[in-house]
Amino acid sequence: MEEILRVNGLSKKYEDLTVLDQLSMSVRSGEVVVIVGPSGCGKSTLLRTLNALESIDGGEVVLEGEVINPGNKNLSRVREKVGMVFQSYELFPHKTVFQNLTLAPLKVMKADKKETEKEALALLERVGLSSKKNSYPRQLSGGQKQRVAIIRALMMHPELLLLDEITAALDPEMVKEVLDVVLSLAKEGRTMIIVTHELQFAKAVADRMIFIDGGRIIEEGPPKEFFEHPRTDRLKKFLHSFSYEE
Amino acid sequence: MDAEVLRSYLPGYAEAFFLTIRIGWIGIALSFGIGILTAFVSYYKVPVLKRIAGVYVELFRNTPLLVQLFFIYFGLPKIGFSLSAEACGIIGLGLLGGSYMSESFRSGLDAISKVQTESALALGMTNFQVFWLIVFPEALSLSVPAIVANVIFLLKETSVFSAISLMDLMFTAKDLIGLYYNTTEALFLLVLFYILMLLPVSLIGSIAEKRARYKMLGV
């Protein structure tokens, strides 16, 4: 499959702290890459550099042949190709669920109104939220909000979807309803980069696992090997911190 | 109180009432524009303009309207700008109100998280679209209580217009007292007309506050 994203020697510093250290990776079309790592390891920063929400101090991000950096002139056009879902949902509180979905396609892509509305309804149906069409975000549960946030990103037909710890703020019983949506997206061949702490889910959804620590990729591989036969001590220790058995 | 006196004073008060409302609301509209502009400039940290906005806000928030009016009405003609009393009143109120509105908008803008902005950017919106479609309407909703308070405050501040011989409510009352010494009637009508002017604003304001809060926060 063709490569859709390439990251070359990406570096990022906050004053003296190195957040990303010469990090390189690539993602193929249709691939689901799950990134795990301890807090503060740079995984969220990495995700945010991929659509230029974060400036970089070295290296480059290339999406479908186009270099992405915050100084880019057609940044908004590049960002249309990269959907992003955040931990804190970030729906627009002054807009209804339906308006949240249609706003960007209509204003940014100047998409056809009828088509856009039809698509929004279909996506709402798909995630089981048709009845919430005219609700405001505050009237939804966390899980419902996050499902809306996911389909809001899909409305822009992104080539690549970035999910940044999208279940971290959810009550445990709502995690599954959100992850089920992600799983179904993976099945239909969406290209996704997912940062998560849900290792069970990672195992189920990932084509490739990446472990980041100290701003570098420490280990990567298919999920089965990654979880069952970790090669590095750091990954072993990290995986161990999730288990309670002796 | 003499009903006949009240009746004979009414037309004068009515005229002053409409003058006060006209100048008051034009001034408030001006303060709205100035407030949004300066809040925008300081929120987005526009170089140079940000400094100017900061000086402006502190200057006008920390001086009394009366002093500002004197400067505009008596000071500007000295350097060649002669304006009518009405124009001075509108400009004075607009500048004073602008500094208050600016702070109100800014508190609304500051309440919007960075991630909210980023989520709009991530959908491909330009900076201008993010401001116009997301940040501004949200900040406006959050600022409604402060804006309502400002509007009421500014309408009351119009009472110093009499100092630059604008025939507002206060001027009319002082004038009539000076002429006829019917202090009770004159002050009674003064209070009545101020309440007439401000009560609807308070009522509509509190409805607007409730609606904005419900929309944004659901309580």
Image (tube, rainbow, N blue to C red):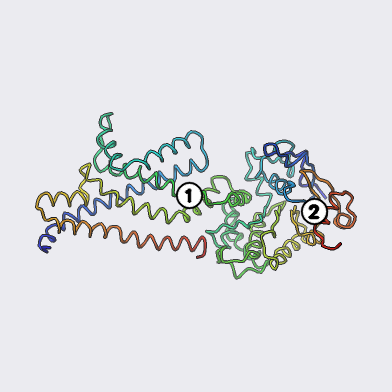
Query: Of the residues shown, which amino acid type is indicated by label 1?
Result: Ser
Decide which of A35, A15 is in the foreground and name it.
A15
As helix, strand or loop, the secondary structure at mark 1 comes to helix
Residue A70: x %, y % from top left: 65, 40
Q: Is residue A15 left or right of residue A241?
A: left
Decide which of A229, A47 is in the foreground and name it.
A229
Which marked residue is nearer to the observer: mark 2 or mark 1?
Answer: 1
Decide which of A100, B94 is in the foreground and name it.
B94
Residue at 22% x, 43% y is B163
Q: Furthest residue to the top? A: B79
Residue at 51% x, 54% y is B138
Q: Height in image: A206 above or below B79? A: below
Residue B38: x %, y % from top left: 44, 42
Residue at 55% x, 64% y is A136
Task: Confirm whether residue A30 shows in the render.
Answer: no
The image quadrant where one finds the N terminus of chain B is bottom left
Q: Height in image: A122 above or below A76? A: below
Mark 2 and mark 1 on one chain: no
Residue A34: x %, y % from top left: 78, 54
Query: Of the residues shown, which amino acid type is indicated by label 2?
Result: Glu
- Name the residue carrying label 2: A31
Q: Is residue A216 left or right of residue A101?
A: right
Q: Which mark is residue B107?
A: 1
